[in-house]
Image: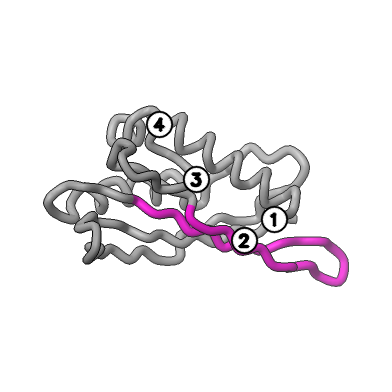
Amino acid sequence: MSAAANELLRAIHATLTEDESLTALVGVDGIRDRLVTGRHLPCVIVAELVTTDYSTATEPGEQHVLTLQVWSDASGQKQVQQIASVVGSLLQDARLPLETVSLVNLRHLDTKTRREAKTRLFSAEMRFRAVTE
């Protein structure tokens, strides 16, 4: 993973964990890098980050497609949709504090909600696209 990608992930994690409205919904340890059985739900998981070269003839750059998942054991989709809405509003066009690169943009691409057949948990999978130079 590139230094820019790591810096982007740290800034996104900081933005999410510092927001009181999101923390009220998922708890202080509710933003994690993996889903662990027996841990507190609901939570937001950093599921995947795909980074590709996005350089121009004059500037180096990277495109990052980030997948976040919201998980809930509630009896319906309302909770995951509410959390996904807060996450989306926090990250859409966010001005993240990056030190070594510039964030050109950060856009929400899509959200897919579903109920997992095996676990009966509800999830919302959110994808974001970020470009750094």
Q: Is residue 69 magenta?
A: yes
Alpha-carbon distance for marks 2 and 3? 17 Å
The amino acid on which the numbered mark 4 sits, given as a three-letter code, is Asp
Residue at mark 1 to residue at mark 4: CA–CA distance: 28 Å
**Which of disc 3 and disc 2 is earlier in sequence?**
3
Asked which secondary structure carries label 1, the reply is: strand
Q: Residues within 10 Å of mark 4 (few under 14, many from 20)?
A: few
Q: In terms of secondary structure, where does tag 4 sit?
A: loop
Query: What number is the disc on residue 33?
Result: 3
Q: CA distance from mark 2 to mark 1?
A: 8 Å
**Which segment did they paint magenta?**
47-70
Q: Which mark is residue 78?
A: none
- Residue identified by numbered label 4: 29
Main secondary structure found in the magenta portion = strand
Disc 1 marks which residue?
A: 132
| Residue under the point 33% across and 37% down | 39
- Say few, some or many: other residues with alpha carbon within 10 Å of mark 2 (under 14 / 14 to 19 / 20 or more): many
Furthest toward the bottom, the residue is: 57
Question: Residue beneath label 2, please?
Answer: 64
Quick one: quadrant of the N terminus? bottom right
Spatial separation of the CA atoms under disc 1 and disc 3: 22 Å
Give whichever of 1, 133 is nearer the camera: 1
Is tag 2's residue or tag 1's residue first in the polypeptide sequence? 2
In contact (CB < 8 Å): disc 1 and disc 4: no
Circles 2 and 1: CB atoms closer than 8 Å: yes
